[in-house]
Structures are given as structure tokens and as C-alpha cells.
Image: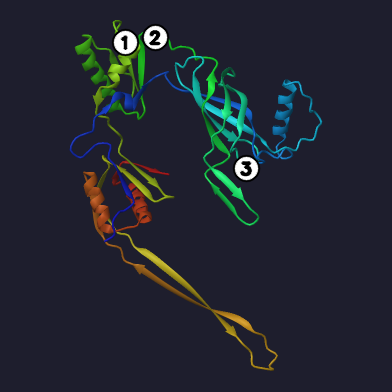
Amino acid sequence: MRRLAVVLLLCLISAQASAAVRIKDIASVRGVRDNQLIGYGLVVGLQGTGDTLNNSPFTQQAIQNMFDRMGLIVRGANLRNRNVAAVIVTADLPPAVAVGSRIDVTVSSLGDASSLLGGTLMLTTLSGTDGLVYASAQGSVSVTGFGVAGQSETLSQGVPTAGRIANGALVEKALPPITDDGALTLELKNPDYNTAVRIADAINAFAGERFGRRVAHELDYRSVAMLRPPQISATRFIAEIGDLLIEPDTVARVVVDSRSGTVVIGQDVQISPVAVTHGTLTVRVTETPQVSQPEPFSKGKTVVTSQTQINASQQGGQMAIVGGASLRTLVAGLNRIGLKPDGIIAILQAIKTAGALQAELVVQ
């Protein structure tokens, strides 16, 4: 009997007891996040793999603007060099970063350049969503992919039109500091009512022993509000409660990826007892061409005829009882039927339609 080889078991909670995790792994402090930066620049020094200026007018305009700032007049000149490429530069600005710190940047081709290998990014300003400049980037672009083309064959690996510059940007403007008024809020990465309550209870149990007071309460299924004790700093307070262990709760969910045939089943998924049968219909069409040759001197024509043979066969599926209160029982019931991934996906959708799947079904 065929096994469910492609069914992945996503066990967030073990069969015997739930796995305890740290609070800082499932929640983050509101307001402490990265900010995205973007800029437009030029990569120079390419070996004939840059933009075709006739096809990328924005590259030619950027080159002319750069020369104007340098005091060189090239307006009206017919530029034909292919060692320059227009790129979009992106970066993530971490919270509480100081002016003068360095961050990584990603460089991506904007025109028809075939490779950024060996290129150098010229000084590019990076702005935030507010339009202000927060960093400036410059340096050699590191590209992992390559592409080689001949007259009759092309060989490529990876993406040679995108690369990174490690520590390639200098922070010119720091983000405004987060006001510390003693009120802090934790936001759950996977919102759940039970998880929010357990986080608040764990923090209060810790704060009761350490500070002699309750400091947390759940706001909703996504956030937990805290009031920092005055005798401890916000950084130390977040560090201490971040290591507290709780047992998170999750919604019963089945995730189906119809393209790859992957099925992910959560630990709490249950199926009410149902009888399932699955049969497949196979139709085979065979074409046998035959050549009809006329007799000599008959003035006939040689024609090709085809004989078509169609065979249809249907395999009767087994009737099996599928259901159970545990993940192991559910998988064992699906294994008894012996199905391929597409059959498993079809059965799960049918069970959900019948109302026997006591979980959320997500089809990607």
C-alpha cells in the first residue's frame, strides 16, 4: 500500500504536552521595527554587460545628470557605452541605529543589463517613505550568479542582474527615538486569544515575584499591554520577560499547495468519522499511423492513414473510515486508502465540504 510520502506534519504542539517557547520568539514590541529605504543609482565598470542606452533612456538621462554635477557637458552627445547600468538600491534601516553605522544594501538592475558582475555602485542616496534621506550607499557589487552566451548556446546560473553590498550604506540620519513613558505593548506574530492570555499570565507571575505587582493585561487576541516598573529600564525589562516560557496555542489548520502537492496538517486538526472512497479513471488513446501505397502504374497517391484505439479503465477505490481525535490517527486513516498527493487534496476538500473537517482549510 502506498504511503503518504509528501504529507508534512506540522506539529506545533506535541501529542503528549505542548512545546514551551520564549515570549520574544512569538511576540515583538510595538514600534520597534525596521524601516525600508529605496534609491536610484548607477553601477559602472561593467564589461560590456550594461544597459543599451537606446533601449534605456533613463540610464542615459542619469549619466547626463551625473556629468552635469561634475561640470562635464555631454548634452546632445550620442552615448554608446555599455559599461553602465541603472539600478534600484534597497535597504532595511534597523531601529535605534546611530548615525555613521553601516547597513547592507541590495542592488537590482532596472534596464536591460545582462549582468552586474564586477560593477561598482556610485554614490546613491536612500530615502524613506517620508522622502527624507536616511543613508547613502556606494561600493563594489557582489553578484553570485553568472551568464555566458554564445552563438548557439547560453549558460546561466543564479541571477546575475541582482547583487548585494555588505555594509555598503552609511546611515546619515537616525530614526526618532521611541518615547519611554513606561507603557509597552507586545504584538503577537501569530494572533490567538489563548496565547495572549498565557503571555499576560506569565508576565504577571514573573512581575509578582520580582516587583510585587501585576504589570500586564491582554488587550485583544493580538496584543498585550504592559506597564514598566519604575525601578528597571525598558531594555532590561524587555530582556527579562523575553526569556519567559509559555505554551502557545494555534488554530487548527490544514494548508494545501495544489501546485507542488504538499499537504501540511496541524496537530489539533480533527476529522469527524466519515466513509471515504476514491477511484481513478484512466483513458489511454493510441494512434497507429499506416501508409497506403498504390499499385505500380496505377496513378494513385501515397497516403497516410491512422488507426485510433481508445481504452478506458477505472480502478475501484477502497472504502475506508477516516477520522480521529489525534493527528496520528488521522494520518493512519489517510494512509489506509493509499493515495497520491492530488487524491489526498481532493479528499480533504470533499471532507471539508461535507462538514467533517474540524479545521480551517487553506488552499494555495
Q: Could you tell me which residue is drawn at 29 percent across and 47 percent down?
A: 356
Q: Are marks 1 and 3 in contact (CB under 8 Å)?
A: no
Mark 2: which amino acid?
Asp
In this view of the protein, which residue sits in the foreground, 61 or 14?
A: 61
Sort mark 3 into few (<14), some (14-19) or many (20+) by Cα contacts within 10 Å.
many
What kind of element bears circle 3? loop
Mark 1: which amino acid?
Arg
Indicate the position of residue 289 as horizontal and vertical percent values.
55, 79
Indicate the position of residue 73 as horizontal and vertical percent values.
79, 25
Sequence-first disc among 3 and 2: 3
314 left or right of 304 in image? left
Sequence-first disc among 1 and 3: 3
Q: Which residue is mark 3?
A: 114
In this view of the protein, which residue sits in the foreground, 142 or 288?
A: 142
Sequence-first disc among 1 and 2: 2
Q: Could you tell me which residue is drawn at 25 percent across and 36 percent down?
A: 13
- Residue 354 in view, yes or no: no
Q: Quadrant of the C terminus?
A: top left
Q: Could you tell me which residue is drawn at 31 percent across and 66 percent down?
A: 316
Q: Within the image, what quadrant is residue 129 found in?
A: top right
11 left or right of 290 in image? left
Q: Quadrant of the N terminus?
A: bottom left
What kind of element bears circle 2? loop
Q: Within the image, what quadrant is residue 151 found in?
A: bottom right
Q: Could you tell me which residue is drawn at 36 percent across and 28 percent down?
A: 189
Q: Which residue is mark 2?
A: 180
Q: Are marks 1 and 2 in contact (CB under 8 Å)?
A: yes
Q: CA distance from mark 1 to mark 3?
A: 55 Å
Note whether 120 is above or below 265 in the view shown.
above
Indicate the position of residue 192 as horizontal and vertical percent values.
32, 29
